[in-house]
Image (cartoon, rainbow, N blue to C red):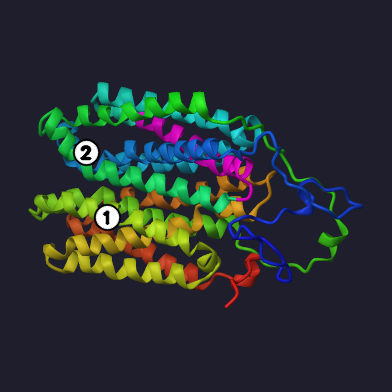
Amino acid sequence: MENVAPSSAHSEHPAAPSLRATDSATPSSGTSILVADHDEQVTDRGRTLLVFALIILVGVNLRSVILAVPPVLPLIQRDLRLSYTATGLLTSLPLLLMCAFALPAGLLAGRFGGRHIVAVGLALLAGGSVLRGLWPAAFPLYLFTVALGAGITLAQTSVPVLARQWFPTRIGLVAALFSDGLILGETLAAAFTLPLMGYFFGVDGWPGALLLWSIPTVIVLVLWLIFAPPAAATQPARSATSTPAQQEAPARRRVSALRLGILLGAGSLIYFGMNAWIPPYNQAIGAEDATPLALGVLNAIQLPVGLLVTVFAQRLVGRRWPFVAAGALCLVAILGLVIAPIAWQPFWAACLGGGSSFVFALGIGLPALLFDRSSVARLTGVTLTLSYGVAFLGPLLGGAFWDMAHQPQWAFVPVGLAGLLLIALGAALPSRANFGLLDDPA
């Protein structure tokens, strides 16, 4: 995916952004050079594979610790005597933290370097995960969820910054690998939390299950401290100097961080809302046995969808129809889930998981692709702040609707609204040319 003028030739690396003159060029020459310091770039093949693996592992752990909660949510609600609103808050609290701290996290990554901020984030994640498993009471559970949510935000916001520095010609690939790691973490936690809990701790051992998922976070933190390459702080602001080429370039309407954040947020709301309320919903209608398969399909479908989007990302990015199609699919699926027989639930869950993954995989790498080195940290923070601010409302409002209406299907109302939002905002996107992206030939 390139950020180039319409008259430019295609690059040998389709996923690489163009290098703008404002990044590091003198006004007289009009020539741009690679913005990342050569000492930061990872070029050795073995080192590259190692860093790719680290990025995937970081992504896995940023999701496994929070997606381990929905499978045991009915047990937590019963043992801690939580209302449905309080239960929804427990699931959506990490999203609120991501919303509140994404912009500060982006600024910190630009100021102190993404490598250091990821390390701090992993440390908070590991500490919060360990302590919430060791202290299974309501207030500590919320408190340590705040700590691990802050850690997730710091690490997740910093990875796109590092992708820009370590792999400036392969940002799209790195973003896709990180996205795949996030999806893999979601899938593993959703599919294996209940079986692992039953095997090691018994059918009511949810504190042990949460503690179990903290072990990989500690391991990944150690690996990151040892093997992550150096990465300097990025420039805090774009240079005010512009080149003659820039001054003469025609104005182009681009997708703003505001719209991108809301689009991503609608997809995330669908995903987190479904993970939060499928288990209590099934329990309320007497279909608890359907929960493991539904959650497993909801999460597992995201990995092949993410990989498929990666293959066709250059052709899909900047188009309206993927967001409209994803919104329509999710809207139909949520209606089917509450109306159709329970035997169809895995199918509807697959549609919802695939649709939300489609939106996420197309959007997660755009800040790093569309903005220069000096602003990518800040704009990634802005995008994620908006995204998780929208996503936070899903589980919370779902619980509030259920409490008010006393009907379990009302928990899915925010999911349906998010589908409508994807359709409306997707249709309102500017044309692909306004992204500064080229269509592939033929």
Magenta-span inclusion, residue 156: yes
Q: Give the CA separation, mark 1 to mark 2.
A: 15 Å
Q: Is residue 406 above or below residue 72?
A: below
Magenta-span inclusion, residue 207: no
Residue 359, image x and y in percent?
Answer: 43, 60
Q: Is residue 9 above or below residue 97?
A: below
Residue 203, image x and y in percent?
Answer: 10, 34
- Which part of the image, by quadrant, shows the C terminus? bottom right
Residue 236, image x and y in percent?
Answer: 71, 38
Residue at 56 percent across and 66 percent down: it is: 318
Q: Nearer the viewer, residue 35 or 353?
A: 35
Q: Which mark is residue 298?
A: 1
- 367 left or right of 316? right
Q: Which mark is residue 193?
A: 2
Secondary structure found at label 1:
helix
- At label 2, the amino acid type is Thr
Q: Which residues are magenta?
A: 143-169
- At label 1, the amino acid type is Leu
- 295 left or right of 306? left
Tell me if label 1 and label 2 are in contact, CB under 8 Å.
no
Residue at 12 percent across and 32 percent down: it is: 199
> Residue 239 lies in what quarter of the image?
top right
- Which part of the image, by quadrant, shows the N terminus? bottom right
